[in-house]
Image (cartoon, helix red, strand yellow):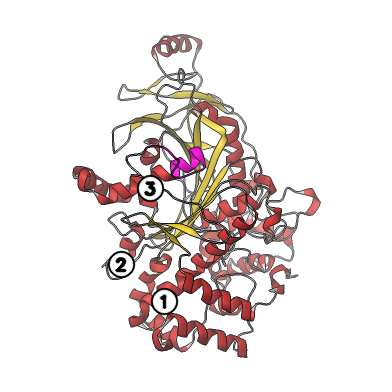
Amino acid sequence: MYQYIPKCSKMLQNCFLGLIALCQFTTVICEVSNDGSTRPSLDISQGKIVGRSQTTLGSGKVFHSFQGIPYAEPPVDQLRFMPPKRLTNWEGVLLADDDGKKCPQKDAIFDSTPHGQEDCLVLNVYTPIENLQTDKSKLPVMFWIHGGGFTSGSGSTDFFGPDNFMEENVVLVTTNYRLGALGFLNLEDDLVAGNMGLKDIVMALNWVKDNVGSFGGDGNQVTIFGNNAGGAIVSLLTHSPMAKGLFSKAICQSGVYKLPQLFNIKQRHRAFVLAKMLNKDPTDSKSLLRMFNKLSAFDFVKGAPKTFDSTEVRDVQKNIVPFGPSVESGVNGTEVFLSTIPEDVNELPNPNIPMMFGFNSKEAIVYLRSLINSPEILDKLNYNFQFSLPFRGLQFPYNSDDYIKVAEEIRRFYFEDGVIGNGTLDGFVSYASDEIFYPVDKTVSEHLQVSKAPVYYYRFSYEGSLNFYKRAVLNDADSVSGASNGDEICYLFLCKRLKHVYDELYLNEEDATDLNVSRRMVRMWANFAKFGDPTPEKEDDLLEGLKWHPASSTRHDFLDIDNNFQMGQHPGSQNIAFWDKIFNTYSKLEKSANVKVEL
């Protein structure tokens, strides 16, 4: 998969020395591309790499990109389902000038065709330092973790172009990690312990610690940030001893460890169900692993969604993913990412780092495509309301008195007259959005109890031409108000799918409100990485005197990211009060969360 420029003969090496003397880049070979331009090249711990020079879409600022850099051995053959293995050095020069392959996946929204390959553990590094040889700056590093429900996504420039952050003089790193069963299968024993995808990210963070200095970054000043599942992973990293000391700040966008999709029960059982779906009949872990190692990666991508049905979702009362983060057994001294479900914030390995938490005003808009295309779903939901609970710790026997009572309370709160249909799409969006909002808000409360560092809180409400996900799922983006899950992404990053929109915005730059929102957001995110404060006390014409105050244990101050960027208090207080009442009234220990299913 990787392209290497092979070692040269002695004569050619001598020729290259003459070229090197003319170059202005670091430890540097300066490679000459086919079009005659020079390429930045440097040494890292595994060998030499060659990237490419680019300019930002906005101001034309020069930056260097090094893409598709492997950070671990390919997780193939006997390394499938294993923790990542440290990468050995390569010979020659690695050509790192394009996005690497995505991990095996299919996208439920945009591309349902399985694609990708297992040799996918790569990352991308972008640096705004033009002359890496003479400029000894050590810039803050921002390490992005993509979302996708633990089943799809990558760190590629499809959605995560670096231009905006290059304007803010930070080093940006984006990464891939294993997805689905290949990244999260857990047999609850020492053969396959689970959380391989999370351990991939820890390996990538260790790589950054060892190598980012070569790109002008400060390995001791790393901010991890991510959205949705990526935000949940950021939250989990703050709880994992494996990640201690690998980052100094964290941003959780629409995702925290309390999301109901995390920590599915019956992990071992689900693995054997998957085997049966793939026409295999293993008798134990060893035979299952032998069989799984002979299958195609796409077998797992296609088979995983079939391992549970609507009855299971109904009984668990959670919106679950087949394979995701789970508790590890820690058998035989294997290194563990998580040994228990994080519940006690007093045991945080990194309790006193600055944190930012946020959510989008109408997260569940992204789900509307299926409801609009299949309106009968709402009718079925109306006659057989199978609710989802946005928090662990609460579960009811199906059709019990408590189940029926809670279902009726939820219907009355979110749906006019308790009726679910086409006329109550807004109510459905509000209800489903609280599956993200409520866990985020409760996580903010927890951190405020124990952390001595500031906690910043935001709501992204802005609606504009860069709200990609909302516009992708709705023919009429104005028919439902609010910002969908993921809608903040194309304000922070340059999204290839919206290249034509950016081009139009830059043609009318002075009047482009969308660009102003984007620039202000990126400035605040970069300020947080630099100073631990999104709006530090310094003159800034772009932020125009805006002050983002941290939240406190008695008052959830938050920044509403909309046209006016105004501070508010206690977002969604009515909805929070409703769910607090539900949990205070009906809460009971969810004992099944730690039950192992023996086969």
- Amino acid type shown at disc 2: Leu
Distance CA(mark 2)–CA(mark 1): 15 Å
Neighbor class of circle 2 (other Cα within 10 Å; few <14, some 14-19, many 20+) is some
Give, as a single range, the part of the protein colored magenta.
Answer: 525-539
The relative height of residue 158 versus residue 140 in the rendered view (above or below) is below
* Pointer 2 or 1: first along the chain: 1
Location of residue 119 in the rendering, given as x and y in whole percent from the top left corner: 54, 44
The residue that label 1 is drawn on is 428
Helix, strand or loop for disc 3: loop
Report the disc number at residue 474: 2
Amino acid under disc 3? Leu
* Residue 176: x %, y % from top left: 51, 46
Pointer 3 residue: 546
Give the crowd class for mark 3: few <14, some 14-19, many >=20 residues within 10 Å.
some
Residue at left offset 20%, top offset 48%: 511
Say which label, 3 or 2, has the lower sequence index.
2
| Whether label 3 touches label 2, CB < 8 Å | no
